[in-house]
Image (spheres, rainbow, N blue to C red):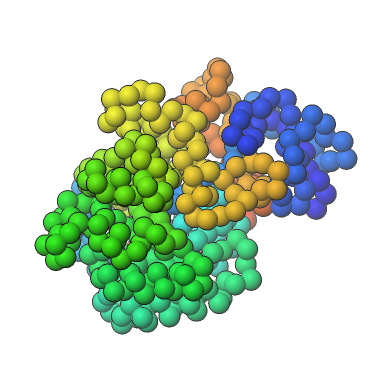
Amino acid sequence: MNKVAYKSDYIYYDGKLQKNKYLIINNKIVESLSDTSEGCEIIEFSNSCIFPGFINTHTHLPMVYFRGLADDLPLMEWLQKHIWPAESKWLSDEFCFHSAQLAAIEMIKSGTVCACDMYFHSESIGTALINAGVKGILGGGVLDFPTKIANNADEYIEKAAELLLKFKENDDINIALAPHAPYTVGPESFKKCIDFSNKHDVLIHTHLSESTWEIAEITKKYGKSPALLMDETGMFDAKTIFAHCVHLSDEEIKIMGEKNVNVSHCITSNLKLANGFAPIKKLMDAGANISIGTDGAASNNNLDMVSEISMSAKVNKALSEDPTFMDAETALKCATENGAKALYLDKMGSLKSGNYADFFVLSFDSAHMTPVYNPVSHLIYSASSSDISHTYVNGKCLMENGKILTLNEDEVKKNARKWADKIKNN
Ligand SMILES: [Zn+2]
């Protein structure tokens, strides 16, 4: 591929808004921000801003097929009576491949270039993401009880080792271990995950302190809270990311801050399941790294990072009684740079020399985006994902003027409806 100079009214380059410049991409990589387009093919976007692509740090991509299947319920009832039975009945390689394609389209349409996933049949999910052109961290699920996949933690970890081998050659797919949560995985199994992570240098992705039910259950079983249990097992000192982190004491926040723990903040899921409000300001002030996750589409009910960061910015202001907290720039950083840091992804999370050319174009053509004083403000407070016109990963265009180029969107939606008919009629 020749060098390409992308021109837009604004470019959010290396954490700063720049005007009247060219973003120079050489093959997959950002070369520079330049005043000139000499020697380059020029691609110009009018009335718009180029932003680094979003990184969704917690999701369960295939759950898009369970979107709207069961709502308005408490977490444990929702999981035990609806989601887990549906998963045990329907999950297969085919189900996860088809559903991950739908999820990938949703990601591309909302400017998301990479997702940190936790599910089963991850090989099929990986194949779907590769076909779509997006990047992923595939979290091989680990549980202490048997499912169709495996019988115990050792066997689940073995499956993850196979996954690691399968995607070894692919730079866009990384593998993680995904022990589900302290209430489904015991400390000994978490320790096995840490050993595996140390040996193979892979991320561990888990849920933590999501609900008051979890706090009570773990405290009853182990005599300490889930966060203190995680600290004791060594999880806060390992290569880890924790989704939710809603119910934390000041002591736990202090420990997590001191250890710069990676947190995936999933505000919409927490709101919808009425799990409470994560102490984001306290965690951030203490030193934790806050990134943004949508969680699965059955508890959100979408994978839209634009609405997620907007919600997070506004709710965290109200919660902290401080309108200056989670300002637009900080919200954007959480959804990009902090996400890359949390997932240990070098060369991602911002547009700067040497990083991958992963970006989206935000159009200011709609009435609700007019006029423009500050493009970052518009992205966080005015935009919806339909204002994103183009998405690029590794310099490759995955969506052009709202049209997905890598997958057949109509076919993918048709498949989703077919699966839903089966699920409904059962
Ligand atoms: Zn989750």
Residue 77 in view here: no
Q: Nearer the viewer, residue 408 or 262?
A: 262
Q: Is residue 223 above or below residue 44?
A: below
Q: Residue farthest to the right?
A: 39
Relative to 202, is 391 on the left or the right? right
Which quadrant of the figure has residue 173? Answer: bottom right
- State whether residue 104 is above or below residue 96: above
The residue positioned 36% from the left and 46% from the top of the image is 257
Residue appearing at x 53%, y 50% in the figure: 340
Q: Residue at x 61, y 57 (%)?
A: 133
The vertical placement of 257 against 192, above or below, is: above
Residue 162: give x, y in percent of width and height. Answer: 50, 79
Residue 378 in sight: yes
Residue 118 lies, in percent from the top left, at: 40, 62
Q: Nearer the viewer, residue 215 or 132?
A: 215
Quadrant containing the C terminus is bottom left
The spot of residue 305 in percent (x, y) is: 45, 42
Expressed as whole percent of the image width and height from the top left, the position of residue 288 reads: 39, 45
Residue 232, picture quadrant: bottom left
Whether residue 51 sits left or right of residue 139 in the image: it is right
Residue 296 placement, left or right of 114: left
